[in-house]
Image (cartoon, helix red, strand yellow):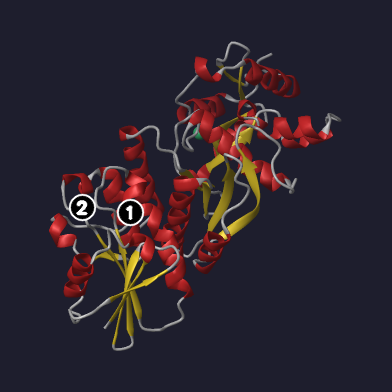
Amino acid sequence: MRVTIKERYANELTYEVCRCIAERLNLPLDFEIQYKKGNGRYVLLEHDGFKYYVIVSRLSADARDAFLNQYVTTVLGEYVDDKSFVKKLYVYVLDKSQKAKAKYIVDGYRMLKTMGINILNIDELRMEINPYVTFEDWKNAQDKMREYNKGNNASYAIEDEEGGYTLFGKLYGANGKDAAMTACMLACIAKSNDTFVRFIQVCEHGTEEISSTDKKLLQSFGVIIDSGAIVLKGKAAGKDKSTCRHQDEFKYNLWEKYGDKKCYMCSCDIESNIIASHIHRICDIDKSGLPEAEKRRQAVDADNGFWLCANHDKLFEFGNVTYDMCGDLVINPSLKSNQTDFVKYITEKYGIEKAHFTAGLKVYLKIHNNRVHLGI
Ligand SMILES: [Zn+2]
């Protein structure tokens, strides 16, 4: 049997580790390890024309990304590139302590399982790993984790109005690895739900685009990589000026301001029903005669919008509801009483929260209210 590892991991992927793996796979235990240059934290075992790629975790599960997730896409890339037909990909976990069962680490196991990658020695962790079956399933788990670990916002995904999944993935370092793995995992969920994943690149720390290896990998999973990119902190983004790009950036900014897709007026959180709704409309911004840079700023400015459900989006656009300049909800008095009752019935929240009612928002609201002759 042939066993190969990358020489940079020789200290941790020892003969003992390889032997444990071989045992798990019921492979011969008499082998010598061959060392190769390059990246990829995995053991490759070749026997009888069959190839087993085994991603191996770090020795200790002290940090989420550094434990396992950050190694996945590199190995996955090589695995997908390997055109052998008889191959299989596994994970082997070196830390079997309680630390390796932390919520955010188990999330990684579940993501792997969703991609059809099993942990060889899961019995040693004494737990069962369930894959994410639906987008909501994964999203709920992320929400729970965010409560637990608020700083962790490597990537953010929404179900869009077309029913596809849009993933905003940060590109830098461990975030980049995490986003790429998430994209592959979502692609597996999308496939079984007959839909697609769009990957929007979010640039930070000077990264301009996704690495060519991750790009190739994502494409092999059927992920659509958007050609442009969002640059954080409002700097001018990419080469492409399409309105579509603006819309993605606008959504990302709304997420940063308001959090997950949820109607501001009724709290409906059925994501495919929620629209990134402008206060000062894009068509009016386009006609405004302002310099392009200013038009662009207004089009993506989180202060110029809310997440609204399809109903509230239209009610707001046509001036059947708005907010007055104190931030209180106003229902158009020209509605018939049964229509007013309907609006009241579907509305839950009657004002803009103080933290959201910024000077910038007031400027847009004034323009809107003048247009619809309400709440002025
Ligand atoms: Zn609503």
Residue 329, percent from left and from top? 55, 18
Please say if 328 is above or below 55: above
Residue count near mark 2 (Cα–Cα under 10 Å), binned few <14, some 14–19, many ≥20: some
- The foreground one among 49 and 31 is 31
| x 16%, y 74%: residue | 23
Q: Quadrant of the C terminus?
A: top right
Let me know if residue 47 appears in the view.
yes
Type of the residue with mark 1: Leu
Let me know if residue 314 appears in the view.
no
Q: For marks 1 and 2, give the CA distance.
A: 10 Å
Residue 114, percent from left and from top? 34, 61
Q: Most extreme residue toward the right, as rendered? A: 289
Type of the residue with mark 2: Asp
SS state under label 2: loop
In the displayed structure image, the side of residue 348 where residue 145 appears, left or right = left
| x 55%, y 65%: residue | 216
Residue count near mark 1 (Cα–Cα under 10 Å), binned few <14, some 14–19, many ≥20: many
Q: Which residue is mark 1?
A: 68
Which quadrant would residue 102 be assigned to in this image? top left
Q: Which residue is mark 2?
A: 95
- The foreground one among 137 and 21 is 21
Q: Earlier along the polypeptide chain: callout 1 or callout 2?
A: 1
